[in-house]
Image (cartoon, grey):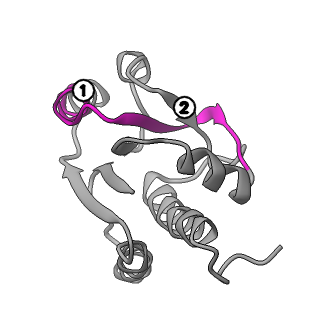
Amino acid sequence: MLIKLVFVGKLKDKFMQARADEYIKWLRNGNKVEIIELADSTKEKEGEAIKKVLEKEKGFNILLTEEGKLFSSIKFAEYLGKIDKKIVFVIGGPYGLTEDVKKEADLLLSLSPLTFTHELARLLLSEQLFRASNILAGGSYHNE
């Protein structure tokens, strides 16, 4: 899989950053992963920057938002396994994504009905992407 991760802002907590880096390192075994970090700004300016990246990347756009679709880990892995082109994941800043940006989505995805900080969402997405990759590869990380 070719995966682009588009994040607004940097992870400020060094422990959260270390853990997210670990999942991304594991995910890179068998997958090409690129991280694009955009500067924190207003919701509108972040939206403009995100749209520019999406236009350039021309991938299958999965945007994280609390009103998005929920998956189990296995169903998420199966869904990703059917995508036959570059997958671009987007996590907006603390105020979320503009409606204009959401229109660019091929899928609006929710990690949970609960609301998380964008930093925690980044860590959770990293873990779930590694888990999905491991499920698709027949690995033993995921327990059923």
Image label count? 2
Q: Who's the residue at 39% across and 35% down the image?
A: 60
What x and y, as percent, mark residue 4? 30, 51
Q: Nearer the viewer, residue 107 or 119?
A: 107
Residue 106 colored magenta?
no
Mark 1 residue type? Lys
Q: Who's the residue at 43% across and 59% down the image?
A: 119
CA gap, disc 1 to disc 2? 15 Å
Quarter of the image with the N terminus in it? bottom left
Disc 1 crowd, CA 10 A, few/some/many (<14, 14-19, 20+): some
Residue 26 falls in image quadrant: bottom left
Q: Is residue 78 left or right of residue 32?
A: right
Under circle 1, the secondary element is helix
- Give the magenta part as a residue range: 48-71
Determine which residue is flagged by label 1: 51
Disc 2 crowd, CA 10 A, few/some/many (<14, 14-19, 20+): many
Going by the picture, which residue comes out furthest to the right?
144
Determine which residue is flagged by label 2: 108
Under circle 2, the secondary element is strand
Mark 2 residue type? Leu
